[in-house]
Amino acid sequence: MSKTDRVQRTALAEAERRRSVLIRAGITAALVVFALVVGIVVISGRDTPGAAAAPASVTDTGALRAAEPDVETLGGGQTPTRVLTIYEDFQCPSCRAFEATFGSALDELRTSGAAAIDYHPIAILDRMSTTDYSTRAANASLCVADSSMDNWLRFHSSAYEQQPAEGGAGLTDDQLTEMAVAAGAPETVGECIADGTHTDWVASSTQSVLETNVNSTPTVLLNGEPLQLTTPEALTAAVLAIS
């Protein structure tokens, strides 16, 4: 065999070796990508939560309804004639201002039986605290509502009176528990608050609300229609105008 033939055969062998290495590398890379894709699919499927069980205190629409037993109803049935629906976030400064301005008017409309108030505590401002305070406060309020709506209304007022500044850690679970017990909830409410019993439901409820194009708080509806708020007197007049 000539020197030229030996050089050519060596070159061909080297080329074949390189091609084999590349093929094996390609197969290995493909398997790695496939494994990653499968892993992602499995993890996604495993981590996707089912529908969170609704707290016993909420209505079919996911609201906490504050209404007197003798609230005016349509044709003497179960549906209130007038329903004010309020979407709020306990970390929201505008919600605190709304409660300070309109809270007394809402109480009067409710206690007189003129309207039912449907409260939706949602959590869209977790980013404004370092401890997901919006979610924790909403969960705490639901823990209180498990005992009674009267307790919840007192907790609701206190939560806005003691609303923490944005950007911090918010109230601790112990502080929320103290507030809840002061509102009338039993001592066992602390377990519900610390365990985040209703946290998953708060997340799913918030997502459901956002899908209805409610994207700011407070959002106020009167019998399902957006209500432009000016003064407490105008709010009361708008409600009572519905017969």
Image: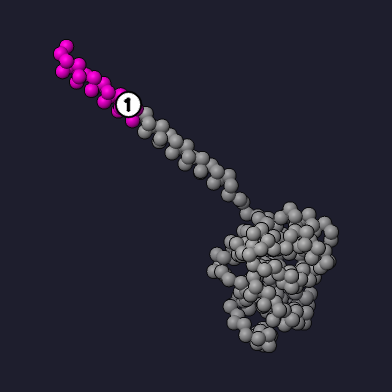
The residue depicted at 74 percent of the width and 70 percent of the height is 162
Q: Position of residue 82 (x, y in %)?
A: 68, 79
216 or 64: which is nearer to us? 216
Question: Mark 1 sits on what residue?
Answer: 20
Within 10 Å of disc 1 (Cα), the crowding (few <14, some 14-19, many 20+) is few
The residue depicted at 71 percent of the width and 79 percent of the height is 100
Q: Confirm whether residue 205 shows in the render.
A: no
Magenta residues, as a range? 1-22
The residue depicted at 66 percent of the width and 58 percent of the height is 131
Q: Confirm whether residue 104 shows in the render.
A: yes
Left or right: 225 as drawn, with respect to 150: left
1 or 141: which is nearer to us? 1
User: In the rendered structure, does residue 20 fall within the stretch colored magenta?
Assistant: yes
Q: Quadrant of the N terminus?
A: top left
Mark 1 lies on a secondary structure that is helix
Dividing the picture into quadrants, the one containing residue 93 is bottom right
Dividing the picture into quadrants, the one containing residue 99 is bottom right
Q: How many marks?
A: 1
Left or right: 212 as drawn, with respect to 109: left
Q: Quadrant of the C terminus?
A: bottom right
Prevailing secondary structure class for the magenta stretch in the rendered image: helix
- The amino acid marked with disc number 1 is Ser
- Residue at far top of view: 1
Q: Position of residue 71 (x, y in %)?
A: 75, 78
17 or 36: which is nearer to us? 17
Image: 122 above or below 110 = above
User: In the rendered structure, does residue 62 fall within the stretch colored magenta?
Assistant: no
Q: Position of residue 83 (x, y in %)?
A: 67, 76
Q: Position of residue 121 (x, y in %)?
A: 67, 67
The image's colour scheme reads one colour
